[in-house]
Image (cartoon, grey):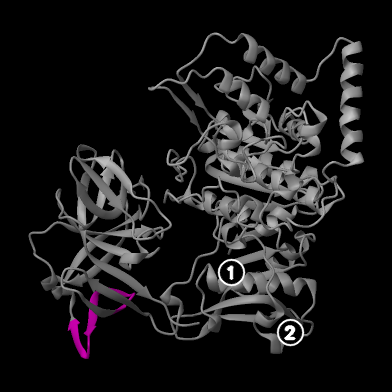
Amino acid sequence: IKSCNYMEIEEYQNADRLGRMNKSSNEEGPQRLQKNSNTRKAIFELMLLFNKKLKEKGLIDIKDAAVFALKEAKQYADKKYSHIIVDESQDLTKVQLEFISCLYQPKEYSSIMFVCDTAQSIYPHSWLVKGRSFTSIGYDMTGKSTSLSKNYRTTTQISQAAYSLIQNDPVILEDDNFVAPSLIDRQGTFPVYRAFANVKQEAEFIANEIKDYLMKQYELKDIAVIAKNKSQLIAIKEHFDKHGITSTIFDSDLDFEEDSAKLLTIHSIKGLEFKVVFIIGLNRNVIPYVTYLEPEDQQVQITTDRKLLYVGMTRANELLYMSSSRAPSQFIREIDSKLLKLSIRNLIRSFYPISIEEYCFKHKIHNLFNNEERVRQWYIKELQDTYKYPIKLIEIEYPVNSFSKTGAVDIAVCIYGKNGTKVPFIFIEVKAYGTDIEKGVKQLKSYMSNEKTCSYGVATNGREVVVLNSVFDIIDDIPSFNSYMLPNSLENFNYIDIKHGRTCLIERDVKSKQEIEVTEQQDKKFFSANDTRQFMVYGNIAAGLPIHMNSSVEDKFYLPADWFNPNDDLFILKVRGDSMIGANIEDGDYVVIKKQEDAGNRDIVAVSLTDDATLKRFVKMGDSVLLMPENEKYEPIQIRTEQARIVGIVCGIIKRVYEHM
């Protein structure tokens, strides 16, 4: 009531409730808090009584202070400003916005600019939400507004995960002031999500991750741990102190240059950013925290907390970790599971359920509803989708002899050895979700000891994954599929010649890459080692916003020598990202680059910006250059001509041909 400056009962009796203002609601239906009702009258009288009691004690509350300031400004404000910029205006109350208007001096050359993002409106008394327009505070913005949709703060992967969260909220999406974010293809890694049974496990993981990994790459001041409630931060600080990790809980005197991890509530981190962010305690009944009984009021609380988590996620510049310490928040389920990982250092995605209709090897499974089976099917899906193993290399219940007994490995990945025989390469032991993994590790080691060809082992309970090498050292990850694992060692690539508009198939033996066979239409031609040209393969270059060009040679590739001018300086780059898919350049493809410092309009170029490089279509516009993506999800990069140093132009695309699973 006070935030909206409803100081007369008639104003309050006729005001629309916030919970009724989304387009999806039944606008003609009854309101629990009826207009012109005795209930509203009682609430207003309660406020008056509350104010009276405060006055008797010589006190006011923060909302009264704003109302008094507005009254003073209306009567006495004589210092007017002809130019005002209001940032974070989506968080201001009606009273605060009217106060700013009192300080504005309208002149022919005057301006007042409001910057707002309704997706980040995290306070229940904000005025400019739910379709409330600037007209409601006396400003006609028709034809005067500009949408800024690019997020330069964080990586593509973090942005995708954060946006997938708010996509589930019709209240946010239907707001007239909402601007859907555009992706800037700044390649990084997907956020990590880990589920823990209790706070101690959660805190131990975070402390170990910081000590064993992050402190090798970042300073402590680059790291923030954020939570819904301050009590959660106090608990994590106790664990940090035990591990010797310097940390500081946020207060008004927080020194951001002090080399300590910063502990903040999600509300406190608004407007800030850190290279690494941990969001902890994403538990049911913590976020969202719902106290109201009516569905409309509950929706307001859920939307506010969903925005709060969105704000927290987008504070991370480079790495984002999220975790729960008991039953997870509903918001975790709302984030696309393809956009969450179990670890920064491996490929596997966080656990997600597989429908029984999609189960593999159903004819070999005794109990389709077993809890371990849920985890096994998730890992089989990851082997296929993330690690690219063909299903014919995957087996379940693989028999292993152990002395006089025969055991069965839950999952085995097999490859073909030098003599063409199929042998186990990876053993995976699966436990029910969230149960003790140590028993699985012990069983895994026993199985691996009895199969000398088994090079890797994995134990998982869906919440965590332990990866072992052949001597039982814990390592980061298993290898992805490679064509040498198949019965023959042949691998195929499609080569697309951009200049001449032709496509051909290249076949080679991984054991003799210098010799290739090229098929174009129906014609096949063999090229010996004397007929091919060697290309150095560098990785990775981002098909998106610049990332650092890795100068080390990743591989060598051989193409027919007579396809290229012998005087041209050529090399190959590996692509990461999907911003050039419209030009048939996909994540994981290779592009042949002809090194040169100039380019024609609309050539696809590798451009160096300072020490970084990006792959884009080159468009000259006067004294500036547009680096255009070929994916509508991404925005162009506009730079001055002198900022763009062309590394070379793309003259060919190489796409690996995977065998169908």
Q: Which secondary structure lies at badge 2?
A: loop
In the rendered view, tell whether residue 370 sits above or below residue 244: below
Q: Which residue appears at 74% of the width and 33% of the height? A: 233
Give 3 or 545, whichever is nearer the viewer: 3
Say whether residue 36 is visible. Answer: yes
Locate residue 361, reporting x and y percent.
66, 85
Give 338 or 49, whichever is nearer the viewer: 49
- Residue 517 within the segment the image draws in magenta: yes
Left or right? Give the position of 425 relative to 609: right
Q: Residue 397, located in which quarter of the rendered image?
A: bottom right
- Residue bounds of the magenta highlight: 507-526
Q: Which secondary structure lies at badge 1?
A: helix
In the rendered view, tell whether residue 284 sits above or below residue 8: below
Residue assigned mark 1: 382
Q: Residue 446, located in which quarter of the rendered image?
A: bottom right
Find the distance from the CA under tag 1 to the CA under tag 2. 19 Å
Q: Are marks 1 and 2 in contact (CB under 8 Å)?
A: no
Q: Which residue appears at 75% of the width and 67% of the height? A: 431
Give 540 or 173, whichever is nearer the viewer: 173
Locate residue 623, reporting x and y percent.
18, 40
- Residue 628 within the segment the image draws in magenta: no
Residue 122: give its label. Answer: none
The quarter of the rendered structure image containing the N terminus is top right
Give 124 or 387, whichever is nearer the viewer: 124
Residue assigned mark 2: 365
Locate residue 400, reporting x and y percent.
68, 80
Say whether residue 471 is visible. Answer: no
Q: Which residue appears at 20% of the width and 53% of the height? A: 648
